Amino acid sequence: MIQINGVHPRPPHNVLGGELQTCSLDPLTGFYRDGCCDTGPDDHGAHTICCIVTAEFLAFSKLAGNDLTTPMPEYGFPGLGAGDRWCLCAGRWREAFEAGAAPEVVLEATHESALDVASLEELQSAG
């Protein structure tokens, strides 16, 4: 959890209003690589939407310039396969949604700030 001047603010919340749940520890995801789709001022990509990636989405992302399938061991990234959970950038999820390629969203593990990019109904309907 992010600290501000050594103090923990309220725990992060999900789009349903509850406490943000873990998205994935294997593969380890999240901007802070803590398994959660938490965000903060350094997270310019807003890695806030926890998804279960599909082959269709991975192909879409690769065509859009973000190859999530190729391992990058130097960054501790194993590469993703269909069925993996991953914290996606909210903007990329929006692009995939508009293209009909958005993967299923894990609402309990999706940060509430994702609602700045997509409605709860849109998040629920994906996949």
Image (tube, helix red, strand yellow):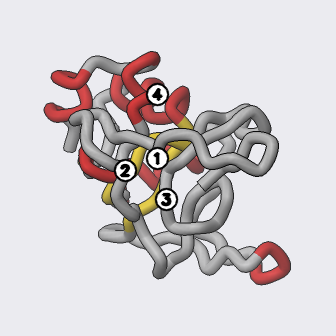
Q: Which residue is mark 1?
A: 11
Three-letter amino acid code of the residue under disc 4? Ser
SS class, disc 3? loop
Q: Earlier in the sequence, mark 4 or mark 1?
A: 1
Query: Which of the 4 image quarters holds residue 69?
Result: bottom right
Q: Which residue is mark 3?
A: 36
68 lies left or right of 19: right
Q: Are marks 4 and 1 in contact (CB under 8 Å)?
A: no
Q: Residues within 10 Å of mark 1 (few under 14, many from 20)?
A: few
- 49 vs 24: above or below: above
N-terminal-most mark, 3 or 2: 2
Question: Residue sitting at 67 percent across and 58 percent down?
Answer: 32
The answer to whether the residue labelled 1 contacts the one labelled 2, judged by CB atoms less than 8 Å apart, is: yes
Three-letter code for the amino acid on which mark 1 is drawn: Pro
Q: Which numbered disc, 3 or 2, marks the residue closer to the eye?
A: 2
Name the amino acid type tagged 3.
Cys
Q: Which residue is mark 2?
A: 20
Q: Position of residue 24 (x, y in %)?
A: 43, 70
The answer to whether marks 3 and 2 mark residues whose Cβ atoms lie closer than 8 Å is yes
